[in-house]
Image (tube, rainbow, N blue to C red):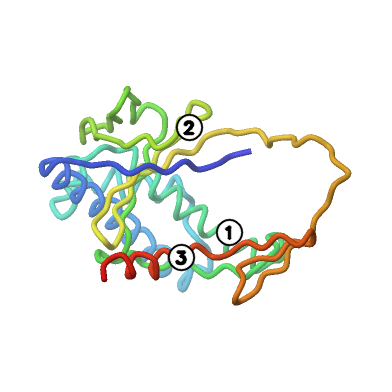
Amino acid sequence: MKARYKYRCYPNLIQQVQLAKLFGCCRVVWNDALSHCIQEFKTNKQKPSNSDLQKVFITQAKKTIERSWLAEVSNIPLQQSLNDLHQAYQNFFNSVTGKRKGAKIRLPRFKKRRSKQTARFRKGGFKIGQDKVDLTKIGKLKAHWSRSLPSEPSSVTIIKDSAGRYFLSFVVETSAEILPKTDNSIGIDLGISTFATLSNGEKIFAPKPLKNNLRDCL
C-alpha cells in the first residue's frame, strides 16, 4: 500500500524565490485549464482530455508571450498539476455516478495565491542525498530527516503552508505490519476529567502541555 512521509525542509532565499515562481506556474496552469474545462462543459457538455490540456496549457502556452515564463521552471510539476486536475475530475464524476463510495466529492476549484502552495515531482525530477533533496531547477534543499524512508519514493511534493513553512512529502510503498496473535483484549473509555480509563482499572491522564508550560512561566 502507499503511504506519505512528510519532512520539514529549509530552502535558502534564492530557492524560496525559485519555489515561489514554480508554485505560481503550477497554479496558473491549473487555473487556466480549469477555466477552459468549465467553459467547454457549458458549451459541449464534455471535459477535454488530459492530453489535450497538456498540449494547450503547457506545450503551446510556453510559445505565447503571455505564458512564455512557464519555460523557466521544470516541466514535470506542470504536467503533474494537470494530472492532478484530471484526477480531481475523475473523483468527482465517480462520486456523482456512485462508483466512488463515501462523502460526495466536489468539483475542482480554482487555486489561490494565499492558500497552501504545492508542486509535485515524479522520478527523474528529484534526487535524495544524505541530508538534502535535489529538485530540478530548484537545487538542493536542506531537509530534516525525522525518520528514515521505508522504501524508494515514487514522487515528492514540495509544500509551502499558510505559515510560510516548507515541507517535503514523499509517496512510498509500504507493507502492513502483521501483529502477533493474542487472546488478551481490553476496553477503553474516553472521559473528561480522565483522558482514558482501561477496563483493567488503569487510568491515563491528559498531558495538558499548555497548562504545564504556563505554570512553569509563572
* In the image, farthest residue toward the bottom: 192
Q: Residues within 10 Å of mark 3 (few under 14, many from 20)?
A: some
Q: Is residue 60 rendered to the left or right of residue 6? A: left
Q: Residue at x 36, y 67 (%)?
A: 110
Quarter of the image where the N terminus is located: top right
Q: Is residue 159 rendered to the left or right of residue 52? A: left
Sooner in the amino-acid sequence: mark 2 or mark 1: 1
Type of the residue with mark 3: Pro
- Residue 212: quadrant of the picture: bottom left
Q: Which residue is mark 2?
A: 154
Q: CA distance from mark 2 to mark 1?
A: 21 Å
Q: Secondary structure at mark 1?
A: helix
Kindly report which numbered mark, 2 or 1, lies closer to the viewer in this rendering: 2
Kindly report which numbered mark, 2 or 3, lies closer to the viewer in this rendering: 2
Q: CA distance from mark 1 to mark 3?
A: 10 Å
Above or below for 138 versus 48: above
Q: Residue at x 88, y 44 (%)?
A: 183
Q: Is residue 97 rendered to the left or right of residue 16? A: right
Q: Secondary structure at mark 2?
A: loop
